[in-house]
Image (spheres, rainbow, N blue to C red):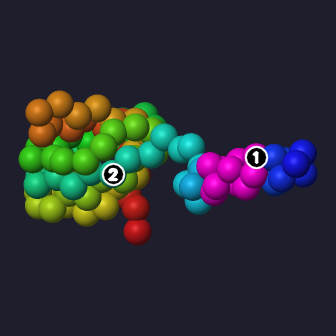
Amino acid sequence: MRITRRLVAAAAAAALAGPLLSMPSAHAAGAYTCFSGERTPAQNGYDLTANGCDGGSGADVLIRVMVGPAAGLHRCRTSFSWNGFLSAQGCREER
């Protein structure tokens, strides 16, 4: 009877841990898609301002700007978005 309880407990633990193992590691990353944007030179790369954005914020953010002077793909250290407007710092072009 004790062995059966241990086997049931082990199987339950494995069933609960399985989905956790398949999840990606914790990494504060996000991605945005924006309609238009502009770059401003900064000490550490450039700053990016954009509008018509949707996505998720965080550190190490990938931002795709569709049209305008900053059209293209950018990787930025930090970002903040509110109501479709985006401000990102420490950016560089992503290829």
Could you tell me which residue is drawn at 64 percent across and 55 percent down? 15
Local SS, label 1: helix
Q: Which residue is mark 2?
A: 31
**Mark sitting earlier along the chain (2/1):** 1
Q: Residue 79 at x, y = what percent?
A: 33, 36
Q: Residue 2 at x, y = what percent?
A: 90, 45
- Mark 1 Cα shell of 10 Å, populated few (<14), some (14-19), many (≥20): few
Q: Which residue is mark 1?
A: 9
Give whichever of 13, 30 is nearer the camera: 13
- Range of residues picked out in magenta: 8-18
Estimate the spatial distance between the alpha carbons at disc 2 and disc 1, rounded to whole Å: 40 Å
User: Which numbered circle lies on residue 25?
Assistant: none
In magenta stretch: residue 84: no
Give whichever of 79, 56 is nearer the camera: 56
Residue 88 placement, left or right of 29: left
What amino acid type is highlighted by mark number 2? Ala
52 versus 71 height, above or below: above
Please tell me in which quadrant of the rendered image residue 69 appears.
bottom left
Could you tell me which residue is drawn at 83 percent across and 53 percent down? 4
What amino acid type is highlighted by mark number 1? Ala
